Image (cartoon, rainbow, N blue to C red):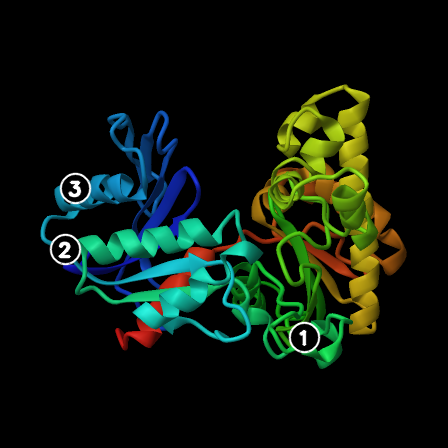
Amino acid sequence: MNDACVLVVNAGSSSLKFTVYSNLTAANADVAATGQIEGIGATPRFKARNGAGEKLMDERLDDTVKNLGGALDSLARWLRSMFGGIRVLGVGHRVVHGGSQYHKPTIVTPQVMNDLRALAPLAPLHQPHNLAAIEAVTQRMPHVPQVACFDTSFHRGQPAVAELVPLPAEIRAQGVQRYGFHGLSYEYIAWVLPRIAPAVAEGRVIVAHLGSGASMCALKNRRSIDCTLGFTALDGLCMGTRPGSLDPGVVLHLFQGLAMTAHDVETLLYKKSGLLGISGISNDMRDLLASAAPAARLAIDYFVYRAAKEIGALTATLGGLDALIFTAGIGEKSAPIRKRICEASAWLGIELDEPANNIGGLRISRAGSRVSAWAIPTNEELMIARHTGALLALF
């Protein structure tokens, strides 16, 4: 490892994920360390491993680590102990919403921060924590440049009809449009496709980013054509605690018929719906798959149903389908969910290779399958590092 690095940060409400990259180039980078501080504000724990997957750290932290600032202080001390006088050349951050103004990664300035704070109501689970991490780094490393990389950027340039929200022009003029999210994940898949699946890389591809947050993206020539997520991260697929597509009349009923407050509705839609709301058991697919409760089975059935329905819709936007790619936590690790979605989409020409699917191979469809299916691990952090290096002219 050389004496300089780029730090990538992905901050949540109670966790701080990080990756330290050295020898950064336009094509790749070396992972010096990656890990997370979880349980911030409760029972914080610091976990880290090197690029080979070997454990570097797994310890409980002092309970005084109550916020992102304290977590960053702990990370800084650990980096100094591990890597001595290493210089941080830049810090790249995942920021969920860039709005209509920020179409590509951007060097953080006070004005940028003001603009991004205004978008917090559109991504309340993520945006405030993303920005809190930037503020904490600014306080501790004021001379280190920071780069905001947006989950919405990859989807800019979609056809106008894909971005349109069918409301009056004066409302649309205020930034009400379909933005799409999980763009850093989709960008990575588009970047590695020519190496992993060259026969379909430039074709008609649907990428299913399935995790606690879930969406799908239609790619043509490795560019985003459409995405199931829209103005906010509530649309499309059923998610861990979010409902996905919902009749707007239901929201009106929550206000008018049930007299719920705006705060109560926001909490319901972001934290109490989806898999958790259907099952009443858990928002974690692993828990639901292990449960024999009818409500757990119903939640899984609905998740698969919505996924298959969206695959059909996105296939229509593409004019056909050459490949289906699974990624993210459920997509990469849950063979039963991949199997059920592929079986529900068999009419498109997907023939699942069950042994390959069960062992988690990259290609999970049979050799003669008209539409191929894949399980490809995503790497949003590498995309952030590459954008950070490019903007700061580090390579």
Q: Residue at x 34, y 51 (%)?
A: 133
Residue type of the residue flagged with mark 1: Arg
Q: Position of residue 274 (x, y in %)?
A: 70, 39
Within 10 angstroms of label 1, few (less than 14), some, or many (20 or more) residues? Answer: few
Q: Secondary structure at mark 3?
A: helix
43 or 246, which is in the foreground?
246
Q: Is residue 5 left or right of residue 168?
A: left
Q: Position of residue 374 (x, y in %)?
A: 66, 54
Distance in Å between CA atoms under marks 3 and 2? 12 Å
Q: Residue at x 41, y 53 (%)?
A: 130
**Which disc is residue 86 wearing?**
2
For marks 1 and 2, give the one nearer the viewer. 1
Is label 1 in contact with label 2 (beta carbons under 8 Å)?
Answer: no
Within 10 angstroms of label 2, few (less than 14), some, or many (20 or more) residues? Answer: some
Q: Name the residue beneath numbered marker 1.
A: 172
Q: Name the residue beneath numbered marker 3.
A: 77
Give the mark nearest the N terminus, 1 or 2: 2
Distance in Å between CA atoms under marks 1 and 2? 47 Å
168 or 215, which is in the foreground?
168
Q: Position of residue 310 (x, y in %)?
A: 79, 56
The reply to whether residue 351 is visible in this rendering is no
Residue type of the residue flagged with mark 3: Arg
Q: Secondary structure at mark 1?
A: helix
Give the mark nearest the N terminus, 3 or 2: 3
Q: Is residue 95 left or right of residue 315?
A: left
Q: Splitting the image into 4 quarters, where does residue 299 fall?
A: top right
